[in-house]
Structures are given as structure tokens and as C-alpha cells.
Amino acid sequence: MLLLLLGPVLAAIAIVFVGAITSSLYVRDLGAAFIAAVAMTAISWLLAVPLDLLEQAVYAATMGSSTPPSQLTAAWHYANYVRAGLLFAVNTVLFVAVALFVSGIEIRGVWGVVLTGILLTLIDFAPLLLAMTVMRTT
């Protein structure tokens, strides 16, 4: 159960961090950020199948095949960059959609949203980045 809360807690911390360092995003407190993170997680779970189909369509359009390539090839690295870009787009859209309905978060500009999208993508992508680092060193 604690692992299920790890993603939303890290996302809430990232949202509060961006709110603290930029003037284009106002976050009242950690509770509002946690509510937004839990809502984003729930929506992404509900949209898991359509998002997977979208990811396969992007792979097919950019790489010629909807299946990911074998590991540690140039195509595999390119596929990971495509996946990171898609994750950034999904995280940014989800954050904007949820922030419009959470009373403790106010969007005042673009840079706070972009920085939040980048941090949320890094949180989602961190396990894969760690795995890629371990595979390169062994």
C-alpha cells in the first residue's frame, strides 16, 4: 500500500517545489498538491488503455513498428526519448486539467506548468533511467 502512495507523494512534493520557486504557479499547501497528485494518478489509471494505444500509435508512426525494439540499441534509446516526450505531454495536460479544479493551486503562467511537467516526467521515468545506467555500467 505504501508503494501506491509513493508516486503521488513525490508528485505532490514536486508540485509544491515548483510553486515555491516560480511565481507562475501558486500552491497553497502540500495538501492541495497531494489532492492534485492523487487525482492525476487516478485519471491516468482510468486512461491507461487509451494512453497505451496512443503510445503504440506514436511508436508505429515514428519507428515503423508498434513494438518496442530490443534493448541497448539506437532504436531503443530513440523509443525511450519518444516515450519521455509522450509522458511529458500527458503529465502536463493532466496537471493543467486537475489544477483547474483543485482550489489550492492557481496557474499564473506557462513556466510553472512546464517545470512541473518536467519534474513529474522525471519522477515517472526515474526507474527506467536507473535501469539504463545500470545496464551501461555492467
Image (cartoon, rainbow, N blue to C red):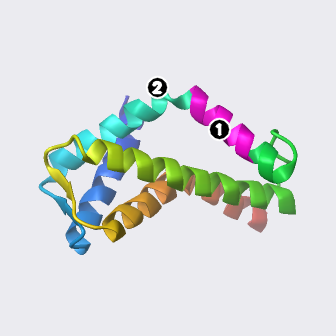
Q: Residue at x 18, y 46 (%)?
A: 32
Which residue is rendered at x = 31% and y = 37% of the image?
38
Q: How many marks?
A: 2
The crowd level at tag 1 (other Cα within 10 Å; few <14, some 14-19, many 20+) is few
Q: Residue 86: x percent and y percent?
A: 59, 51
**Residue placed at 68% from the left, 64% from the top?**
133
Q: Is residue 42 left or right of residue 50?
A: left
Towards the viewer: 131 or 15: 15
Residue 9 circle label? none
Q: Is residue 52 above or below residue 64?
A: above
Amino acid bearing label 1: Leu
| Stretch in magenta | 49-58
Asked which quadrant contains residue 66, the reply is top right
Which is more N-terminal, label 1 or label 2?
Answer: 2
On residue 46, the disc is: 2
- The image quadrant of residue 18 is bottom left
Question: Would residue 70 be visible to someone looking at this image?
Answer: no
Where residue 55 appears, x then y in whole percent?
67, 41
Callout 2 amino acid: Leu
Residue 48 in the image: state x and y as whole percent: 55, 30
Quarter the C terminus occupies = bottom right
Q: Can residue 133 be seen from the camera position used here?
A: yes
Residue shown at 72% from the left, 46% from the top: 58
Specify the quadrant that holds the N terminus. Answer: top left
Could you tell me what secondary structure mostly forms the magenta stretch? helix
Q: CA distance from mark 2 to mark 1?
A: 14 Å
Residue 54 is a magenta residue: yes
Q: Is residue 93 left or right of residue 33?
A: right
Q: Considering only vertical position in the picture, is 126 above or below 31?
A: below
Q: In the figure, is residue 17 to the left or right of 4?
A: left
Determine which residue is flagged by label 1: 54
Above or below, 104 against 137 in this view is above
